[in-house]
Structure formats: C-alpha cells, structure tokens
Image: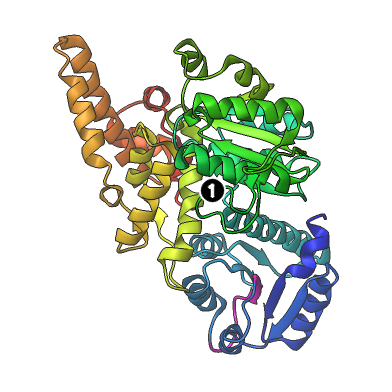
C-alpha cells in the first residue's frame, strides 16, 4: 500500500474565518483522499479537538479572536503530535521563523496555488504516516534505527538474506538489538504472515526448554497434565528465534541438531516423530568459535545454525545512531511516562554532547533506560546533561585518562576538553553561525572549522530553527 493510498487514514482540520477559503481548501485537501473538517475560528477548532483528534491542521494566521499563532501554541502544547501549517496574506520572514520555531510544520503565504497546497499536504501527510508506522513498529519492538554505516550494512544484509530460508546466526554484545534484527528477518521474509516464535534458551533448564520447543504428551513428566504442541511444530513455515543459543547444554545441542538434520521432532513422552517446517534464526553474545575450542559447543551444530551470519556492532561504534535512537526513545517512552497533552522535552546541546561521547557498555538497551529515566526526571522543555546521570562516569573516565603520567598526552587531552567546551558554547550563543562563533573566540573561521572537524562537532545541532 502506497503512502498516498493511506491518506484516507489522515484526519485534517481547516481553520479560517472566510467561508469561501475554508470550502476551497476542503475540496483541495479532500481530493487527496483525506478526511477533512472545517472550523470558522480557533476557539471552535479547539472545541472540535475535544471530540476528535486531528493529524494535521491548516490554519489562517490572521483571524478575529484567537490568532493562528495562538492556536498553534495551544495545539503543540496539548496535542504535540498534531502537525500545523499556517497560512497568511501578510507573511514576513520574521513571522515565519517565529512560527516554525513554535512548532509549525510549514508556513505558506496567500495567494497560494492549489497544487502547492496539495504538494505540501502530501509531504506532511507522508511524514505523519511514517511516524505512525514507527510507533506501531515500536509497540512490536522491531524498529531499527540505521543512520551509521555499520547498521546500514546490517540492514542491507537482512534484506538480502530474509527472502531465503537459510539458517541465520546473529552475533553481538548484550543489548545491541539481536532480537530486533531477528524480527526484521521475519518481517522481510516471504513467510512474514506466518508465526514468529522466540525463546530465550538461557532462561529455561533443559527439561522445560525441550518441552517448549519439542512439545510433550500428557503425563510425560510431573505436572504435564495435558498435551502441549512445541514451538517447532507450531511454527508451520514461520520463524523460530533461539536467543542465547550458546547456553544450551551439549546433550540438548545434540537433540536440536537431529531436528535440524531430519526436519522431524519427537515430543517428550512420545515414540513417534512428527515433520516440522520452520526457518531458524539464532543469536549469541558469546564467541561460538571459542566455545567450540573449549568443548562447550558442538561444531556440527554451529555449521547448521550458521549458514549466514550477521554481526551487530556495539553502540560505541555507531555514533551516528545515538541521537537518532535517543529521539526515537523519547517519543515511545513519552507514551508511558508522560500524561496526554504534555509537551515532550527535547535534548539540550549539552545532553547531546554527553550522549555522543559516552561509551555505552550496555548498548542500545542502556540508552533506552537512560532516556526513559531522563524523561521522568526532567522538569522543563529540555533534557539537560545532569538528567542523564552520565556526567560523573564521563568526567571520571576523562580525568582517569588525563592522569596517564605522560605530560604531552595529558596536556593535549586538557586542551581538547577546553576546546570542546569553548566551541560548543560559542556555537550555542550564535545559533550555529560559524563566522560569528569564530569571532567570539578570537579565531579565524578556518581555524574554528578545523577545531570543529577534529572534535567531530556538527554545527547543524546548534541552528536556531532546530
């Protein structure tokens, strides 16, 4: 289904005190397939919000009573996920910038062209639908953020391997998102409409793991009061995900190997084999080659589960993903942590700096916990560095690094720390204007940019309209 065909899912409100303009805009927007209502004033628009939530509002800026910018402010406070486009016959650059900074999606001047309105609604509508899909995906916990080259390579491999039925081994440190990648393999497969069934092998002893995967007959063991169909049989062409496969005992590994070789399963308490059909995806946070050398993992099983391997890099090697992930977690955690209508706080520049320079030993899982905690502790519209509770670890690590008893190395580290603070503060004060920031520091623009590049500081994070 294309985005345009999904526009029927969008609910749009047009607000203008001129009936002809309201009617004309309604016809234009409705031609895209959207659900459209109109309101003659900002006050009435707000009453309509009490009974129906709107995805997008197109509002005149200059109206009797409540002005469009006042309506914008109230909407973004109470319903922050609603997008607002403001329309005016008296547009100025200053006014446009002010409205955009207040949260407007776009600002358009009269007289406008019908196609211009359509294109604008299409662009904003696609953004709304994309974010809605992301929220739905997050509820299934299978959204992958891939801004870094490492994760883009992972996703390319996922899309390439998913349509096949080969066994896939996902390797990576704890908290990197191995199960999310497993779900993506299922979603991109030809059998995505069939079952996706997951088991954490480390959480179950052999007997229970065998019952979970193989099934059992009534009376097979104490407590087996009824027959149970195992996940291997239940999959019926779907995907089985075995997490922490390295935790299996050697004896159980032998039983799993037989299932993979013979494509049959024998439930506990049964003397009969049953055919099974599933695609196996496994994951390990341990080095299986080392376990094989240590005699703790069967080499023949390794080759059965590892037709293709996908290695997920740790978060500290995916710097480009950190802020994208943090902003994503802000949105999904806000649903659980904030009351409806509360404005979601944004990351301050200092918080962004702390997040990008922390090593993340707990990887993506740790980042999500940090953001959730910061969201709860934040008391304003900005998440500050101290809300993250990472400052001490970061500071201690730097101080420890400085005390390496090498004068030149220590001096360079202190200088680097000073340079970072100076560059960030001056960019903050000038809204990202490099020329003005350089002047404030008494540096040439070229020297300032050279330091920015060496410290990997992105000026776009400091722009006044972000």
Q: Residue 130: horizontal and vertical position, in percent?
A: 67, 55
Q: Nearer the viewer, residue 20 or 181?
A: 181
Q: Nearer the viewer, residue 64 or 268?
A: 268
Determine the residue positioned at 64% across, 34% down.
Answer: 281
Q: In this view, does 143 lie above or below 100?
A: above
Dot 1 falls on a residue whose secondary structure is: loop
Q: In which quarter of the image is residue 399?
A: top left
The colour mode here is: rainbow
Q: Magenta segment: does it hold 343?
A: no
Q: Residue 391: horizontal and vertical position, in percent?
A: 25, 41
Binning the other alpha carbons within 10 Å of mark 1 as few (below 14), some (14 to 19) or many (20 upward) gives few
The number of numbered badges drawn on the structure is 1
Q: Nearer the viewer, residue 200 or 322?
A: 200
Question: Left of 133 or right of it: where is 298?
Answer: left
Q: In which quarter of the image is residue 138?
A: bottom right
Give the labeled residue for mark 1.
221
Determine the residue positioned at 69% across, 21% down.
Answer: 307
Question: Left of 8 or right of it: where is 453?
Answer: left
Q: Residue 415: horizontal and vertical position, in percent?
A: 23, 22
Q: Nearer the viewer, residue 407 or 436?
A: 407
Question: Left of 380 or right of it: where is 28?
Answer: right
Q: Is residue 53 above or below residue 139?
A: below
Q: In which quarter of the image is the N terminus?
A: bottom right
Determine the residue positioned at 47% across, 74% down.
Answer: 341
Q: Residue 180: horizontal and vertical position, in percent?
A: 58, 42
Q: In this view, does 406 lie above or below 128?
A: above
Determine the residue positioned at 24% across, 36% down.
Answer: 393
First to last magenta residue range = 55-65
Residue 311 appears in the rendering? no
């Amino acid at each position: 289904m294309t985005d345009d065909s999904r526009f029927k899912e969008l609910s749009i409100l047009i607000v203008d005190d001129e009936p002809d303009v309201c009617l004309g805009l309604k016809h234009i927007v409705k031609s895209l397939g959207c659900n459209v209502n109109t309101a003659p004033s900002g006050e009435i628009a707000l009453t309509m919000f009490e009974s129906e939530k709107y995805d997008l509002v197109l509002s005149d800026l200059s109206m009797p009573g409540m002005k469009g910018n006042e309506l914008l402010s109230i909407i973004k406070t109470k319903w922050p996920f609603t997008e607002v486009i403001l329309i005016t016959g008296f547009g100025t650059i200053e006014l446009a910038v002010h409205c955009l900074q207040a949260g407007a999606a776009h600002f358009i001047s009269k007289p406008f062209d019908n196609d211009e309105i359509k294109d604008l609604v299409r662009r904003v509508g696609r953004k709304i639908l994309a974010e809605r899909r992301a929220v739905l995906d997050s509820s299934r916990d299978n959204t992958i953020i891939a801004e870094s080259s490492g994760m883009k390579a992972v996703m390319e491999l996922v899309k390439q391997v998913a349509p096949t039925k080969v066994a896939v081994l996902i390797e990576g440190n704890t908290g990197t998102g191995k199960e999310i990648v497993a779900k993506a393999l299922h979603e991109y497969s030809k059998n995505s409409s069939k079952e996706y069934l997951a088991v954490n092998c480390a959480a179950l002893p052999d007997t229970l793991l065998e019952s979970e995967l193989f099934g059992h007959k009534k009376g097979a063991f104490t407590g087996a009061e009824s027959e149970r169909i195992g996940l291997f049989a239940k999959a019926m062409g779907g995907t089985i995900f075995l997490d922490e496969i390295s935790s299996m005992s050697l004896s159980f590994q032998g039983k799993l190997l037989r299932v993979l070789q013979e494509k049959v399963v024998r439930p506990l308490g049964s003397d009969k084999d049953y055919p099974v059909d599933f695609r196996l995806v496994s994951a390990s946070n341990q080095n299986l080659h080392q376990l094989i050398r240590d005699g703790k993992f069967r080499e023949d099983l390794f080759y059965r589960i590892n037709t293709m391997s996908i290695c997920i890099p740790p978060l500290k090697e995916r710097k480009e993903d950190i802020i994208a992930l943090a902003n994503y977690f802000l949105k999904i955690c806000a649903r659980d942590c904030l009351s409806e209508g509360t404005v979601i706080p944004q990351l301050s520049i200092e918080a962004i700096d702390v997040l990008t320079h922390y090593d993340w030993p707990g990887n993506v899982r740790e980042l999500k916990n940090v953001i959730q905690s910061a969201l709860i502790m934040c008391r304003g519209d900005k998440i500050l560095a101290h809300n993250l509770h990472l400052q001490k670890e970061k500071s201690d690590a730097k101080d420890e690094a400085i005390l390496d008893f090498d004068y030149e190395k220590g001096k360079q580290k202190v200088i680097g720390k000073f340079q970072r603070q100076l560059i960030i503060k001056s960019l903050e004060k000038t809204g990202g204007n490099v020329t003005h920031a350089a002047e404030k520091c008494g540096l040439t623009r070229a020297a300032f940019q050279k330091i920015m590049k060496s410290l990997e500081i992105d000026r776009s994070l400091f722009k006044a309209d972000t």
